[in-house]
Image: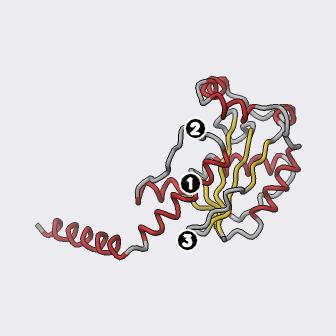
Amino acid sequence: MTDVMLDIETLARSADSVVLTIGAVRFDRYGKRVDQTGIHLYLSIDEQKAQGRAVDPETVAWWDKQNPDIRDDVMRNWGRKPVKEALRDLAEYVEDADKIWSQGPLFDIKILENLYEQNGMRAPWRFYKIRDSRTLFDALGDTRSRDSANLHDALSDSVDQARAVQRAFRKLNSPWWAIKRWLTGCFKRAKKLL
């Protein structure tokens, strides 16, 4: 498995947001294998607040409306790691990845890169390895299960998004999809001629 899907849960939407959890799974975008155990990191909230990271009241209110089991798990105080330790664990997990995927890099990746920088660390990926599943799903259809029981659990969301990327690549590589693209192109060209 050569790719990694990342997902984070936060207390704001800005680049300097407090990161509650990070979920990441390795997967083969062309196959069916997904490392469902992945890595699920709970970062110290107090340490991030002391660093001046953002907590948005609207986001906190949004969390209050989510599944109570998921919300309570994401907000728990026990089992949280110091920020640098969690970032090192993530760096180790993604070290050999060919591509790093997220559901919108301007959120997950941007926030994580900001957190790495604030803690004097370099993000463990190069800019050219970043991939956006949201764009892929817009083009080929969004097949995420969006299981409401696990929605907003970073690890579960990573697994779901990785599987949806695999389905998108199977669709993209199917003969029918190639024929459909060719026919669409023919119709567009014919329409211009009329």
From the viewer's perspective, is residue 67 above or below residue 122? above
Q: Quadrant of residue 83?
A: top right
Number of the front mark, 3 or 2: 2
* Residue sitting at x 84%, y 40%: 80
Residue 65: percent from the left, percent from the top? 59, 25
Q: Is residue 134 left or right of residue 193?
A: right
Label 3 secondary element: loop
**Which mark is drawn over residue 16?**
none
Closest to the observer, 102 or 2: 2
Circle 2 residue? 149
Q: Amino acid at mark 1?
A: Gln
Number of the front mark, 1 or 2: 2
Sequence-wise, the earlier of marks 1 and 2 is 2
Residue 180: percent from the left, percent from the top? 29, 69
Mark 2 Cα within 10 Å, few/some/many (few <14, many 20+)? few
Label 1 secondary element: helix
Q: Amino acid at mark 3?
A: Gly
Label 2 secondary element: loop
- Distance CA(mark 3)–CA(mark 2): 26 Å
Sequence-wise, the earlier of marks 3 and 2 is 3
Q: Is residue 36 left or right of residue 88?
A: left
**Which mark is drawn over residue 161?**
1
Sequence-wise, the earlier of marks 1 and 3 is 3
Q: Amino acid at mark 2?
A: Ala
* Residue sitting at x 29%, y 74%: 179
* Residue sitting at x 75%, y 49%: 40
Disc 3 and disc 2 in contact, CB within 8 angstroms: no
Q: Is residue 114 left or right of residue 160?
A: right
From the viewer's perspective, is residue 108 above or below residue 30? above
Residue 90: percent from the left, percent from the top? 78, 56
